[in-house]
Amino acid sequence: MCLCGCCCCCAFAYVAADVVAPRRQFVQQNYAALRKGNPTTPFLVREGGGVAPTLVARYDFGKESAVDVSGMDAATIGGKLEELVKAGEGMPRSD
């Protein structure tokens, strides 16, 4: 998936427990393809406790969108990422 609509990053925070298996699965299954298709887009994946797992897209001009992915399976997380990318495609670009 190309993240052309995003200029900066996508981030996850998740805890090291079985309940986060879908988020961990999404990262394990998709990170390499996302990295390969978007070599200049910074990605941040962090493990942490006490924080809602969040997918964040940062666009040009300081615009940022975040989606809480608590309770979502890997396919639904992928769909939310696609929604964030599509939202960015219609935004003004700084290039």
Image: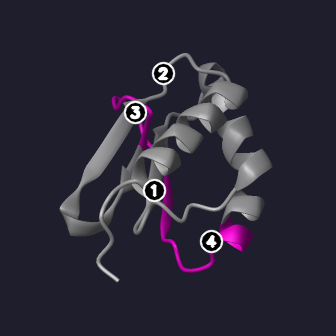
Q: What amino acid type should be assigned to the residue bearing mark 2?
A: Ser
Magenta span: 35-55
> Within 10 angstroms of label 4, few (less than 14), some, or many (20 or more) residues?
some
Label 2 sits on residue: 70
Q: Residues within 10 Å of mark 2 (few under 14, many from 20)?
A: some
- Kindly indicate whether the residue at mark 3 contacts the one at mark 4 (C-beta within 8 angstroms): no
Quadrant the N terminus occupies: bottom right
Q: Residues within 10 Å of mark 1 (few under 14, many from 20)?
A: some
Q: Which residue is mark 4?
A: 38
Q: Closer to us: mark 3 or mark 1? A: 1
Residue 64 visible in the current orientation:
yes
Front residue of 62/10: it is 62
Whole-Å distance between the Cαs marked 3 and 1?
17 Å
Q: Which residue is mark 3?
A: 67
> Residue 64 at what x, y percent from top left?
28, 51
Location of residue 73 with respect to 91 vertically, above or below: above
Pinpoint residue 60: horizontal percent, then vertical percent: 29, 67
Q: Residue at label 1?
A: 89
* Displayed quadrant of residue 67: top left
Residue 47 on the magenta segment: yes
26 or 57, which lies in front?
57
Whole-angstrom CA distance, mark 4 to mark 3, is 20 Å
Q: Secondary structure at mark 4?
A: loop
The picture places residue 32, in percent across and down from the top left corner, at 76, 63
Label 1: element kind? helix
79 relative to 57 in the view: left or right = right
Q: Residue furthest left?
A: 62
Q: Is residue 49 magenta?
A: yes
Q: Which comes sooner in the sequence, label 3 or label 1?
A: 3
Alpha carbon separation for disc pair 3 and 2: 9 Å
